[in-house]
Amino acid sequence: MKIAFLGLGTMGLPMAANLIKAGYQVQGWNRSAGPREKLASLGATAAETAAEAVRDADVVISILADDNATRSVVLEGNVLATLKPGAIHLNMATISVDLAVELAQLHQARNIGYLAAPVLGRVNVAEAGQLNILAAGDSALLAKVQPLLDVLGQKTWYLGARPEQANAAKLAVNFMIASAIGTMGEAVALVQGHEVSKTDFIDLITSTLFAAPVYKGYGQAIASDTFEPAGFKLALGLKDVRLAQDAAERVNVPMAIAGTLRAAHVESLAHDEGHLDWAALARTAARRAGQL
């Protein structure tokens, strides 16, 4: 099975590396040369263009930054036009529901399989091959690529026959992560106003009622003011909150909390915090309370 891997960023590079370790033949592409060269040092073939990478590929895995990057590479970069009929495109990026619907239609018209499989987990989870994978699309196609997903993740959650269903679920999850960070930020500002140590408070909540990965991971970053290097940039969090709102509007679902979170993200960007880890969203509450 020949695999093309497009997008060797923070998540893509360790994922592609795990496929190589599992014995798969991988041809990788990234817009910048550094990650291509690093993957090549692990045994992959580096391609100069995305179209070159997917030529003769049986399966294409892409995990690109956003809608614009996905559209630029897959459509304008001639990836779809180059793929051979019968190939399968496994899109693991977090993209909009609208683009997912469009891509599914365009792939079907060219007799190319299309599956959506965005992931849950940060870079350390990707490195360990322990991602949770949210998959949707034709179940027969999914069965063909399941061995690859078993290398990349601990579990594949099948969410429906339409690819966009996986993207809707991923956006819903990311909205909940944003909510958790925003809530912790306000709670921490509250206790600090009463001269309670935020470190003690975060330790309390993440050891008892909120002993869950999202609260533990982001909570520790909030407690220690550790926002660099970013595991997931705050600016990308804003992108996902916006996409969640768009997906909700598509099916007439009001999301009042999302509007509040979006405003907090925009405020963070106004203070030049978009490059920081998503946990830095908590700084908004502290700033409003005069604690920064």
Image (spheres, grey):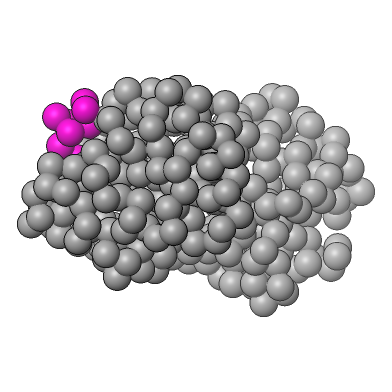
Nearer to the camera, 206 or 42: 42
Instruction: State whether residue 60 is above or below residue 261.
Output: above
Instruction: Look at the image and give the residue range highlighted in magenta.
Output: 136-144
Note whether residue 183 is visible. no
Percent x, y of residue 147? 32, 23
Percent x, y of residue 30? 48, 55
Q: In this view, does 147 lie to the left or right of 194?
A: left
Residue 46 counted in the magenta span: no
As drawn, which residue projects farthest toward the right?
Answer: 195
At x 27%, y 50%, the residue is 55
Instruction: State whether residue 288 is above or below residue 86.
Output: below
At x 86%, y 63%, the residue is 291
Q: Image quadrant of residue 274? A: bottom right
Q: Is residue 201 left or right of residue 254?
A: right
Most frequent secondary structure within the magenta stretch? helix
Nearer to the camera, 244 or 114: 114
Q: Is residue 181 left or right of residue 90?
A: right
Residue 141 counted in the magenta span: yes
At x 68%, y 34%, the residue is 216
Note whether residue 76 is visible. yes
